Amino acid sequence: MKKNLTLLLLVITVSAFAQDKMITKTGKITFEASVPSFEEVKATNESVSCVLNTKTGEIAALALQKFFRFRIALMEEHYNENYVESDKFPKATFKGIIEKFSATNLDKNGKDYTIKGTLELHGKTKEIQITAKISKTDKGIEIKSDFAVNADDFAIEIPSIVSKKVSKKVNIKLDFTVK
């Protein structure tokens, strides 16, 4: 009887904590470092993991570098070997908090929130602050953001031979739906 009661309490406790965390493994990040009049430098990763604690507003995301897909295979190869060195630095991570977040106040129209946290990429860490539109949909909580980072902040070197063709300012779009 004691064992059954302990097991029941454990299941209830785990269920209660699990309800505060929403997850996706199919988040989408698109980045673009294109320069006008040259070949598009753009890639998408649709296998990004994201966890949102709906009670605290804590958020974390993980993107494996080798999952970014380019339109041109040679760009993908250069990206992994020469720019982000994905064998040495296989992932990009973000850990932060959504300021003044309240899951109960979300609706389908969404609201802009400020997210502050730490982005780690290419072995370098940088504090960033972004704005994200967060809404509640039939599928879960949707988080969308557009922001830019500088390649220099993460020691990503752009060789001089292509420096006129690749922007150091990298525009990033996030599209996550956590459930």
Image: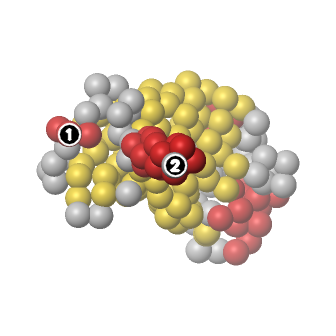
**Quarter of the rendering containing residue 98:** top left
Please, what secondary structure does the residue beneath circle 2 have? loop
Q: Residue at x 61, y 69 (%)?
A: 70
Disc number for residue 1: 2
Residue 10 x, y percent position in the rendering: 51, 44
Instruction: Say which of 176 and 81 sits in front.
Output: 176
- Residue type beneath disc 2: Met
Position of 33 with respect to 78 (left or right) is: left
In the rendered image of this protein, does residue 140 appear above or below residue 92?
Answer: below
Coloration mode = secondary structure
In the picture as drawn, the residue positioned furthest to the front comes out as: 1
In the rendered image of this protein, does residue 163 appear above or below residue 79?
Answer: above
**Which of the two labelled residues, at mark 2 and mark 1, occupies the earlier sequence position?**
2
Residue 58 in sight here? yes
Residue 26 x, y percent position in the rendering: 49, 64
Confirm or deny contact between disc 2 and disc 1 (CB under 8 A): no
Q: Quadrant of the C terminus?
A: bottom left
Give the Cα distance between marks 2 and 1.
38 Å
- Residue type beneath disc 1: Thr
Disc number for residue 104: 1
Please, what secondary structure does the residue beneath circle 1 have? helix
Instruction: Say which of 158 and 19 sits in front.
Output: 19
Q: Residue at x 77, y 66 (%)?
A: 77
Q: Residue at x 28, y 25 (%)?
A: 100
Looking at the rendered image, the disc whose residue lies closer to the viewer, 2 or 1, is 2
Instruction: Say which of 3 and 150 sits in front.
Output: 3
Residue 82 x, y percent position in the rendering: 81, 53
Residue 42 in sight here? no
Q: Around disc 1, counting alpha carbons within 10 Å, would you say few (fewer than 14), some (14 to 19), or many (20 or more)?
A: few
Q: Residue at x 67, y 29 (%)?
A: 125
